[in-house]
Amino acid sequence: MNVRSKNLLKACETLENNTSKDIKYRPKYHISPKVGWLNDPNGLCQYNGLYHIFYQYSPFDTKPGLNYWGHCTTKDFIHYEYHQPALCSDEKFDCHGVYSGSALVENGQMNIFYTGNVKQVGNFNYITNGREHNLVKVTSKDGFTFNGKHLVMTNSDYPKDVTCHVRDPKVWKEDDTYYMVLGARRIDDVGEALIYQSSDLETWKLINRLTTKEKFGYMWECPDIYNFNDVKILAVSPQGVEPLGYKYNNIYQSGYFIIDGNFKGEYKLSEFTELDNGFDFYAPQSFVDDNGRRILIGWLGLPDIDEYYSNPTKDWVHMLTIPRELSFKDGRVHQQPLEELKRLRKSTNNFMCSSERTFNIGTSFELIVEGLTNDFTIQLNDAIISYSEKVFKLEFGKSGMGRTFRAIQIDRVYKVQIFCDKSSLEIFLNDGENVLSSRFYPSDNIMDVTIKTNSADVKLFEI
């Protein structure tokens, strides 16, 4: 740790210790920053039985700035411990931000790869010039001490027809070979994923470039490649995709393609499917734990939305989603709340609803409505969740702070599972077939919940 690191960590500690104690919108069971700004989850892994959750963290402002890697650990996804930032911007090759990346655990060592961000001073457009996106490697023998930052690749090592925007490495191992996927923006403003191969995690060779036949956005961020048996998934967060009906209505999207063929050779990408249809979801990352579960965590927020939505929290912004277990059924990725979250349930209220029922609860709860056969409405203060004429809608009043409605077309909704946590909603339909995640800011600490349906089995859990 150099002097710059020590000073940055000390400044961070001072800010964290002096942050506001206002907890009206502070979540109970989500990871949020102690102070300042949070965005992409990074380096998700299980190491020596402990889950490590890193994330983009800028403690100096409630806007993205000098990003660190924030750090939380948990043994059970119920109790979390915050630690000092794991990585700071303390080298010439990452002086303007330790940007997103991933972790590979092997042979008792955590290998971290991230993008070192540098913005040169001058008259640059920062797309085709003036910006460095460096691939950096750092290792750890205990998960808490990170030493020996090593510059692996720079802009000059990337293809000549891409811009300065090449970032967010995800590294994994198949058989005896290491692979890495990087998100990229080409000079002709086409987004793509670059595939690299290595035998030693030090020297990387470009072996393929994945993109769609027709342009789908100008930049693909936060790529991830994983498989379910013989089904191979390429997950990306594309920027610059135009809305199409109820699809692609956020400023940027997050979703996946199914890879037909071989990501190392000949391939074809399927139609893009959004992983989440709510207002606030971006940059998801996944990993496999010791139990063989593929677990996904996303950012419950979006970049560049300050002009669209106001945020009433003063000293901190954003949070991460609850952890979700991924599976593949009926031709699509499903997301289920992690099994451990059931331990958060406290008092329970179970009943049948055959017309209309209203009740009150605090603003951190889990609500399950199942056995649905027809149209329905679930109202949470001024937030309305409804299904009619094969359209599922999430609508906000004043609590949306500028958010209006999101919708998806779906042939049938038989189950709705809602996680509410002070200022967030995560809605799972049909056991994770579709998910909608959004921030909202209820004015009261008590939620009036009204359910209108012909018939449904309702379970309400305080958390």
Image (tube, grey):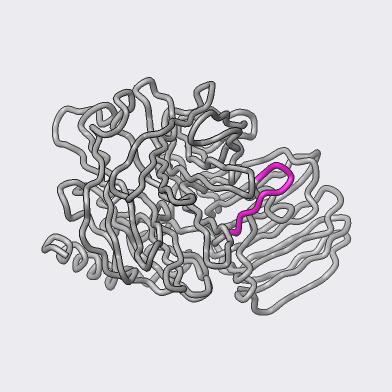
Residue, x 37% and y 50% (percent of image)?
Answer: 101
Of all residues, the one furthest to the left in this rendering is 3
Residue, x 40% and y 68% (percent of image)?
Answer: 72
Whether residue 382 is visible to the viewer of this picture, yes or no, is no
Main structural element of the magenta stretch: helix, strand or loop?
A: strand
Residue, x 38% and y 61% (percent of image)?
Answer: 54
Position in image of residue 264 (x %, y %): 48, 35
Q: Nearer the viewer, residue 309 or 426?
A: 426
Report the side of 31 relative to 5 (left or right): right
| Picture quarter with the N terminus | bottom left
Q: Is residue 167 above or below residue 361?
A: above
| Quarter holding residue 448 | bottom right
Position in image of residue 123 (x %, y %): 16, 27
Of all residues, the one furthest to the bottom in this rendering is 347
The reply to whether the magenta stretch includes residue 362 is no
| Quarter holding residue 295 | bottom right
Position in image of residue 125 (x %, y %): 24, 27
Q: Nearer the viewer, residue 330 or 443?
A: 330
Q: Which residues are magenta?
A: 324-332
Of all residues, the one furthest to the front in this rendering is 176
Q: Is residue 397 above or below residue 140?
A: above
| Picture quarter with the C terminus | bottom right
Q: Nearer the viewer, residue 198 or 217?
A: 198
Report the side of 219 relative to 15 (left or right): right
